Amino acid sequence: MTREDIMQDLAYARTLAEEGRQAPLIGGAYLVLFGVLLTVAWTAQFFVMSRPDLHDAWSGAIWMGFGLLAPIGIFALRARTRSLPGGSSVGNRVDRTVWQGVAIAIMAVVAGTVLRSIFTDDFRVTDAIMAAGFALYGVALYVTASLSSQGWLRAFAWLAWAISATLWFYLGAAWAYLFAAAGAVLVLLIPGVVLMMREPSKVV
């Protein structure tokens, strides 16, 4: 963080204090990014699973594309987020840290399930990634809601946990990918759009 960033955040904090408000969250664009990517990827996965002759090749292409676009999107959004005031507020620091932890946890789940599928030739085990992912999304949303002024996010946390429980129960069902795609819209994309609409403007 540069001196200019610090001064901008201090000025923004002063403005908020004078108005009796708390700094809004500025990470909504990341939720939108992953909401869109996961919705597209899980929907595509559902449709290729209906074509066994194309399943293996297209499944690999889908998730290679996801693995390529996700870091590019994160890199592009980082500069945008840094340009917004309030990044050093408690709510935004918690939000940033908890989602980083969720990302690491999901990568551990991905690594374990993919390795197991390779060594056991049971590729259905990778369906657990979706179920675990929504459970972790719920944790991040709940923690952020509890330690910021965005209490409305708790409803989305509970929704994420309900989706996770459903995915665990129906683990291995082909339609679960379409269900997860709809879940990504509800749990990631919608709250992400709401947060972006509430982003702070530059301090004048």
Image: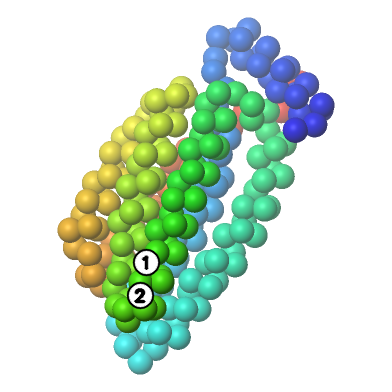
Report whether 87 appears left or right of 98: right
Q: Quarter-wise, where is residue 156 in the image? A: top left
Report whether 165 appears left or right of 182: left
Q: How is the image coloured?
A: rainbow
- Residue situated furthest right in the rendering: 3
Disc marking residue 58: none
As helix, strand or loop, the secondary structure at mark 2 comes to helix
Decide which of 78, 201 is in the foreground and name it: 78
Label 1 close to label 2 by CB (< 8 Å): yes
Q: Residue at x 22, y 57 (%)?
A: 168
Q: Is residue 23 above or below residue 172?
A: above
As helix, strand or loop, the secondary structure at mark 1 comes to helix
* Residue 193 in sight from this viewpoint: no
Q: Is residue 147 above or below residue 162?
A: above
List x then y, in percent, for residue 158: 28, 39
Q: Residue at x 36, y 78 (%)?
A: 119
Q: Which residue is mark 2?
A: 117
Which amino acid is tagged 2?
Ser
Q: Quarter-wise, where is residue 184 in the image? A: bottom left
Counting the numbered discs, the total is 2
* Residue 38 in sight from this viewpoint: yes
Q: Residue at x 29, y 73 (%)?
A: 124
Q: Is residue 111 above or below residue 105?
A: below
Q: Quadrant of the C terminus?
A: top right
List x then y, in percent, for residue 154: 34, 32
* Label 1 Cα crowd, 10 Å radius (few <14 / some 14-19 / many 20+): some
Disc marking residue 113: 1
Which amino acid is tagged 1?
Thr
List x then y, in percent, for residue 159: 28, 43
